[in-house]
Image: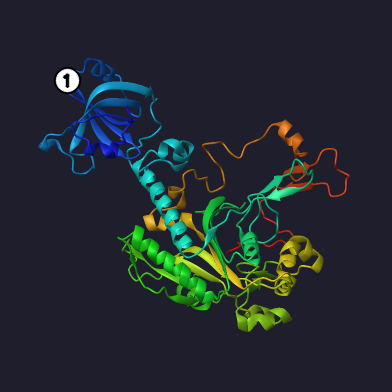
Amino acid sequence: MTRFLISETAKHVGEKVKVAGWVNVRRAHGKIVFIDLRDKSGVLQCVFVPSAKEAYDAAQEIRTEWVVELVGQIVARPEKMQNAQIATGKVELSVEELKVLSKAQTLPFDVTTDGMEINEEIRMKYRYLDLRRERLRQNLIMRHKVSKFVRDFLTNEGFIEIETPTLTKSTPEGSRDFVVPSRLHPGKFYALPQSPQQYKQLLMVAGLEKYFQLARCLRDEDPRGDRQTEHTQIDIEMSFIEREDFMELYERLLIALVQTLFPEKKIQQIPFPKISYQEAMQKYKSDKPDIRTDKNDKNVLAFCWVIDFPFFEKDDEGGWTFTHNPFSAPKPEFIPDLMAKKNIGQILTTQYDIALNGWEIGGGSIRNNTPEAIEKVFEIMGYSKEEIKAQFGHMLEAYSFGAPPHGGIGSGIDRLVALLLGEPNIREVIAFPKTGDGRDLMMDAPSEIYQKQLDELHVAINSKKGIDGNIKSEIRNPGHNTAPGSAKLQINSKSKKQKPKNTLVKKSKQ
């Protein structure tokens, strides 16, 4: 007999069906036993009576969260016993057969509440149980709908979805990289992508013109509030456009998404206001302003664009660094200043950020599309020609073969969905989130690995305390210490972070 989803049962009154799922609640009323059975589609009341002796006797042992399979007839509930709060509230299953598929020990917490009263670290340790609660299940379903909407919208606009590599080159363009040692190439390392930034620009050089991807992005950042070491962004790039062209496209996507999937929400102003960086800082004291006129209305969505950012700012050592993205282009009227490397503090960039209710949900820009302009950006930041070629030679060479004007955005889908659902943080819309300091309490990661694995990677880890009491870890390649190009890294753990020379430390925005 084919299993029916619970949501389908109301259409089959009078028929014999098989259902399966988790025991949500068990209760007894006199000689009758009731259970509420839960599967991914809903909840169904199931009734055990003494006349169906075998099933009735077995039901005496059933406990909450056991996984069971039931066979019986769908019957209409008495009118006074109907439950208008659920889709199956007018029917119930008169159980004839019961099969226990799996028993469950007592859960560490209640999964029938919204979970907000439970210590978050406990919830994350047992995330596979936490996800049984209805609120989180609905969050993941809505996240799926948002992702599908984005894919369908952009596909209809002529974009194609292209996957970019997970193993790439470490380049100093934003946050700290996660690095992966190469077994086949001792002493060399891959980096996990902070974003597909360079790849999507190279796809524009390739002539594909309209690209998108729901991209996984990984950044080895220090603990920072409501952040994750890995997140997903709506990543888009398109050719032969100006700043306003892209802003119009993405604004249209957001409006259609809200109106289709969140009709209860009200967008405060369409088209979205455009606020200069200078005005945002002066009026709102923030580059991601909350412009809601009524902050008490949870259904108001106040989107706005922030534009005209300064391209460069001073770093802690008095040199210049980028404010957003080193591949951004200046506004057209500032291109002569960039190329002449003058009036650096006054150069404005084509960067555009999209903010929602005081949170940044995305950032992008029009890109430099000539090797000469890219070189000038890094020269202003103190890089020698040799360093620029070593780190970004592949980009400069690609651009020497003809690159169209292009631009795009990286927009965090985690943050967007959390805000639209009214959740307090992005962990509530991520299936398996990590703690703020990057730990996976469920999988117990990061963790040590076997010595055999280290040997295969030609990596040794020696931990010892120095005379200052700080732990010093040396990662090296056994047997390759004196070879040219061998990997040797000394890490000193100190309370104060020290910034290496010529390291770009700004968070790279798209």
Q: Which residue is mark 1?
A: 31
| Residue 229 located left or right of residue 461 | left
Q: Residue at x 33, y 21 (%)?
A: 99
Q: Quadrant of residue 108?
A: top left
Which residue is more in the foreground, 245 or 501?
Answer: 245
Q: Quadrant of residue 364?
A: bottom right
Q: Residue at x 60, y 71 (%)?
A: 406
* Mark 1 residue type: Lys
Q: Residues within 10 Å of mark 1 (few under 14, many from 20)?
A: few
Q: Does residue 70 sit above or below 421 in this rendering? A: above
| Quadrant of the drawing holding the C terminus | bottom right
Q: Residue at x 44, y 71 (%)?
A: 304
Q: Residue at x 49, y 72 (%)?
A: 247
Residue 501 is at least partly visible in this image? no
Which residue is more in the foreground, 346 or 261?
Answer: 261
Which residue is more in the foreground, 374 or 158?
Answer: 158
Q: In the image, residue 84 lies at what x, y percent?
A: 18, 43
